[in-house]
Image (tube, rainbow, N blue to C red):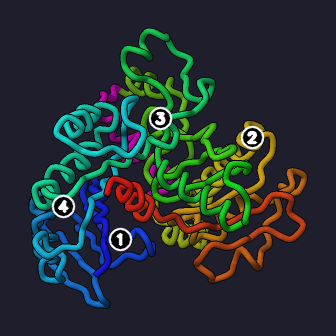
């Protein structure tokens, strides 16, 4: 059995994991623990064409990991006989201190927990995943790979908010950016696919999932990104609205009496597509549009309009682009979004070929026409492989 890296992505109510061969890039086994804290939780573990499943209450993350580890053992991946040589952990926020993959010790874990003030929905479950997994696999290196890492070197003009310098310095206020592992992986894969030097390309990456972000990459370095201090800024998302006038929040506080907790819930859970039309799944959204639902039509138009606005802005930042790349769940699978977001941009050298765009192919592919000066690509993201390879460097 080949050496493997266990990749852990511990979210607020779920745990995703993969056993990855970092050399071949294949996933040997994978699983999902979902609906943690609910009465009807579920664990699925896939290996060698087989699936192990558990349904029932999952009290907390420790309970969820315990159920998953029991399945590891049944499939020959337990701590005693495991081929695991490292564990890679996705950590959403690295603050100003962490930007490169980092070997985890007690001090690093404590700092990740402290950074929960910047990512209260994400860093706490990330830290729990690290703590529990370190106990289960105490004799292998554990490595944190940070979502914010790729954007650590943003130019000052892009990273700096125009607020009081003293306040920004005291409280770590800057543009950190997120989905960095995906943006870096996809922009590198785009260069490889086009047989171009990563260090010479100018690329716009559109990571469109339930969370969505855009980035501008020049000569292998991110020079702009849409998410900011938190994952709330930028594109319209499933339940997050992206860019918003901060005066709206003070207005709702004064006029509607909404307190901090209500505003926080609105911004994170009740905005975006869900806030505008009640759904955040694109299959449901298109079903509503087909039934002539005006709210769904407007929500889709707002979603697409925001993408177009960022594409235009990033073309200006980069001074033109060699490639525009769509990735993640929506970017890879919803052809209408790709076509509508880039329609009528011929004057900017961007032409999407309708037939190529509608192709059922699921691998890396070109969807632009032969006459398009800018290559438009779909590149499936693989954050787990990127994390596995980063962790492998410590072995």
Q: Is residue 140 left or right of residue 348?
A: left
User: Helix, strand or loop at disc 3?
Assistant: loop
Q: Is residue 110 left or right of residue 363?
A: left
Q: At x 77% / y 38%, what residue is drawn?
A: 316
Distance from label 2 to label 1 (Cα)?
Answer: 35 Å
Q: At x 23% / y 49%, what residue is drawn?
A: 125
Q: Residue 143's spot in the image, x, y percent?
A: 30, 50
Q: Residue 241's spot in the image, x, y percent?
A: 50, 44
Contact? badges 3 and 2 (CB < 8 Å) = no
Reading the image, the residue beneath label 1 is: 20
Upstream in sequence: badge 3 or badge 1: 1
Q: Is residue 108 left or right of residue 207?
A: left
In magenta, the rendered stretch is: 257-278
Q: At x 75% / y 58%, what residue is drawn?
A: 342
Q: At x 31% / y 35%, what residue is drawn?
A: 262
Mark 1 nearby-residue class (10 Å; few <14, some 14–19, many ≥20): many
């Amino acid at each position: 059995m080949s050496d493997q890296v266990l990749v852990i992505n511990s979210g607020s109510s779920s745990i995703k994991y993969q056993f990855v061969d970092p050399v071949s890039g294949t996933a040997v086994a994978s699983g999902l623990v979902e609906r943690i804290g609910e009465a009807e939780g579920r664990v699925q573990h896939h290996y060698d064409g087989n699936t192990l499943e558990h349904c029932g209450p999952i009290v907390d993350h420790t309970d969820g990991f315990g159920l998953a580890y029991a399945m590891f053992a049944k499939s020959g991946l337990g701590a005693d006989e495991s081929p695991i040589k490292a564990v890679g952990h996705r950590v959403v926020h690295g603050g100003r201190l962490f930007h490169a993959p980092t070997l985890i010790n007690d001090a690093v874990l404590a700092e990740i927990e402290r950074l929960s003030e910047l990512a209260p929905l994400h860093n706490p479950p990330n830290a729990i995943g690290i703590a529990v997994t370190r106990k289960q696999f105490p004799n292998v290196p554990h490595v944190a790979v940070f979502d914010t890492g790729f954007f650590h070197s943003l130019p000052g003009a892009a990273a700096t908010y125009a607020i009081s310098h003293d306040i920004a310095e005291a409280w770590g206020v800057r543009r950190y950016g997120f989905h960095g592992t995906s943006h870096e992986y996809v922009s590198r894969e785009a260069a490889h696919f086009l047989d171009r030097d990563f260090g010479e390309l100018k690329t716009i990456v559109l990571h469109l999932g339930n969370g969505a972000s855009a980035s501008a990459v020049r000569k292998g370095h991110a020079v702009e990104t849409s998410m900011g201090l938190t994952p709330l800024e930028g594109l319209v998302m499933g339940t997050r609205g992206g860019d918003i006038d901060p005066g709206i929040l003070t207005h709702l506080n004064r006029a509607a009496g909404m307190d901090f907790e209500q505003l926080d819930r609105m911004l994170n859970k009740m905005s975006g597509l869900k806030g505008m039309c009640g759904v955040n799944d694109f299959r449901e959204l298109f079903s509503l549009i087909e039934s002539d639902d005006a709210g769904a039509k407007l929500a889709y138009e707002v979603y697409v309009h925001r993408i177009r606005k960022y594409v235009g802005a990033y073309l200006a930042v980069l001074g033109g682009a060699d490639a525009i790349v769509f990735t993640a769940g929506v970017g890879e699978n919803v052809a209408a979004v790709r076509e509508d977001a880039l329609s009528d941009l011929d004057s900017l050298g961007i032409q999407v070929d309708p037939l190529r765009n509608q192709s059922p192919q699921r691998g890396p592919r070109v969807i632009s026409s032969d006459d398009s000066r800018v290559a438009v690509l779909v590149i499936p993201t693989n954050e787990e492989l990127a994390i596995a390879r980063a962790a492998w460097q410590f072995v």
